[in-house]
Image (spheres, rainbow, N blue to C red):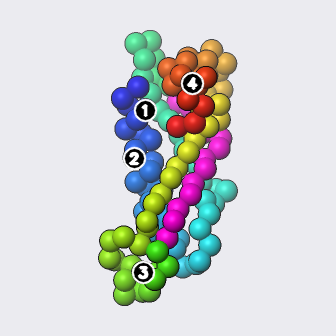
Amino acid sequence: MKTLNKYILSLVVILAFALNSAIAQTNSYKLLSESSMTINGTSTIHDWEADVEKINLKAEINDSLLQAEALSSAGFIQSLSVTVPVESIESGKGGMNRKIYGALKEKDHPNI
């Protein structure tokens, strides 16, 4: 479970940098349909991999800091939120999906 959290945190950082470069070129702030996320994990039996089929990204940008000379200054991304519906994690194997959903307590926490 700790490994999964590390992967999700890494994804948030990567998406923040990707959003940062996209903002420098446009005023549209949306996640591209070509974006993807894959979760790799290990168990006592074997390594596994699952694709995330739905990623929700929301960013609040301080437009006054979007000038070219200010892009390197901290704070132009006021908030960044990445949400993944647990049911959108797909390993291609029904049994493995159920184990992932169970480990993430999908019924109590349907979104990561």
Mark 4 vs mark 1: in front:
4
Residue underneath mark 4: 108
Residue corresponding to mark 3: 65
Q: Secondary structure at mark 4?
A: loop
Disc 4 marks a residue whose amino acid type is Asp
Which is closer to the viewer, label 1 or label 3? 3
Q: Residue visible at 39% across and 46% down?
A: 10
Q: Earlier in the sequence, mark 4 or mark 3?
A: 3
Q: Earlier in the sequence, mark 4 or mark 1?
A: 1
Q: Does residue 27 show up?
A: yes
Amino acid beneath label 3 = Leu
In depth, the one of 112 and 4 nearer the eye is 112
Is the C-beta separation of discs 1 and 2 under 8 Å? no
Q: Main secondary structure of the magenta part?
A: strand
Q: Position of residue 28 (x, y in %)?
A: 62, 72
Label 4 neighbourhood size at 10 Å, few (<14), some (14-19), many (20+)? Answer: few
Q: From this view, report whether residue 89 is shown above or below residue 58.
A: above
- Marked residue nearer the N-terminal end (1 or 3): 1
Query: Helix, strand, or loop for circle 2?
Result: helix
Q: Position of residue 9 (x, y in %)?
A: 40, 44
Residue 17 position in % (x across, y down): 43, 63
Residue range in magenta is: 49-61
